[in-house]
Amino acid sequence: MNRPMMHVVNPQTGESDPAEIRRVFDAQLATALAWRESTAAERIARLKKLRDGMMARREDFYSAFQKDYRKPSAEVEATEFMPVLDEIRHAIGSLKKWMKPKKVWPTIASAMTSSWIEYQPRGRSLIIAPWNFPLNLCFGPMVSALAAGNTVILKPSEMTPAVSAVMAEIIASLFKDDEVALFEGSLPTSQALLELPFDHIFFTGSPAVGKVVMSAAAKHLTSVTLELGGKSPVIVDETANLRLTAEALMWGKFTNCGQICVAPDHVYVHESVKEKLVDECKAVLAERYGVTPQEQRNSPHLARVINQRHTQRIAGLLQDAQGRGARVLTGGDVDVSTCYIAPTLIEQVPQEAQIMSEEIFGPVLPIITYRDLDSVVREINAQPKPLALYVFSTHKQRTRRLLAQTSSGGVAINHCVLHYAQGNLPFGGVNNSGIGNAHGHFGFKAFSHERAVLKSGPILMAKLFFPPYTNFKQKLIRATVDILRLPSIF
């Protein structure tokens, strides 16, 4: 069996060759132009090929994720395979409908014409994926790009080399590089890619790097989708079902060792139920990962922090908070050498602590007691808009008021994180937490140009507005403007 031809990285630098990147980018132009006329059947065939190629390497992915950061195979299935396969299934079942031109009603000014919207591939697309869900956040956007008829260049994270290697082999075995290509490397490779005039860039990562990507895209006026992050707050009021709240929170926070862009970052809990919530959370953690510190450290159900540098960063946030008076409720066990931090809950965290201003992105959860909900809303609105807001309450009017008074990319009520898996919802941030949406139809549209088309009928009604402006035409134009002042009947 012949091994697939992959793009070789420089063994000294670990970077891809900029000249090779340019060659592939240039080669994709002809394909991108040809794929403007690709049919739904042709695009679906590509998606099925990707699905089958990914599934054929299922066991290899298990090993790769275990090697990169000890991710449990069940989490590989649930958080890496499942989202991508759901995207593929959704696109295959809906693509003909998504691609169909959409007719629109004429306005008064466009009377006697017909109009519609066509969805045209943007062209050559670049997808830069992060390390926390390397398969999901690399192949997931690619599904949308291929469904929309684009060519793709992928840049996975250098922090998960084992997973990136398997993805590179899959791409090389399924596609010619003038269709889809994957380049490995770190910052220099990303910089070489960002210098090129792509038609669309899809980036998932931190707000700080998102600004760099957007700045690079601006040089070519390239459109962007930025899936960023932020400190996603949780509000638990006195009416919440505390057992269900604890089960959802401990899942959303500690899956993937807390390294999730939509993970609960900190919890505001009403003072009357705070102790009960903490007790429920401790009970859930003991059930899932073990009662003693040693049992938790040996648990096969806990992933690790991605590397020692990030472990030290999170440990530093925890130490800073403790030094300022924060108290550990459970957890706190740290072993930088093995990239281990126990599931940790802390309280009495002062606002000036670093952990209250920096996105945690790890298995530490501050618990903040509140008495006045309005003060919580003010605190949330004083911060950059988060990627998610989580509200645990059975009080419908209060929940509705919280949604109206805050802004976030998405919201989950009496759950957390799960809105990411609802493919019929747009997934994205707002301002600091992102630009644009992904998933399902929204992902298809992100990689498509919505092209406006107007066709005139045999009678050119607009001639009534052409010069010379006779008295009749002036009166007609004035009357038309007066009509537009009236309330619409629709």
Image: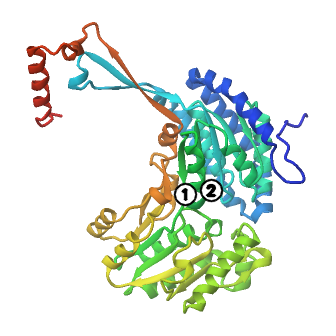
* Pointer 2 residue: 79
Q: Secondary structure at mark 1?
A: loop
Q: Does the residue at mark 1 contact the one at mark 2 (Cβ under 8 Å)?
A: no
| Of 468 and 409, the residue lying toward us | 468
Who comes first in sequence, dot 1 or dot 2?
A: 2
- Mark 1: few, some, or many residues within 10 Å (few <14, many ≥20)? many
Image quadrant where residue 144 sits: top right
- Find residue 247 and name its label: none
How far across and how far down the image is residue 471, in percent?
Answer: 8, 15
Tag 2: amino acid: Thr
Q: Secondary structure at mark 2?
A: helix
Residue visible at 76% across and 42% down in the picture? 56
* Pointer 1 residue: 228
Q: Is residue 205 above or below residue 317?
A: above
Residue visible at 46% across and 29% down in the picture? 97
Q: Is residue 245 above or below residue 7?
A: below
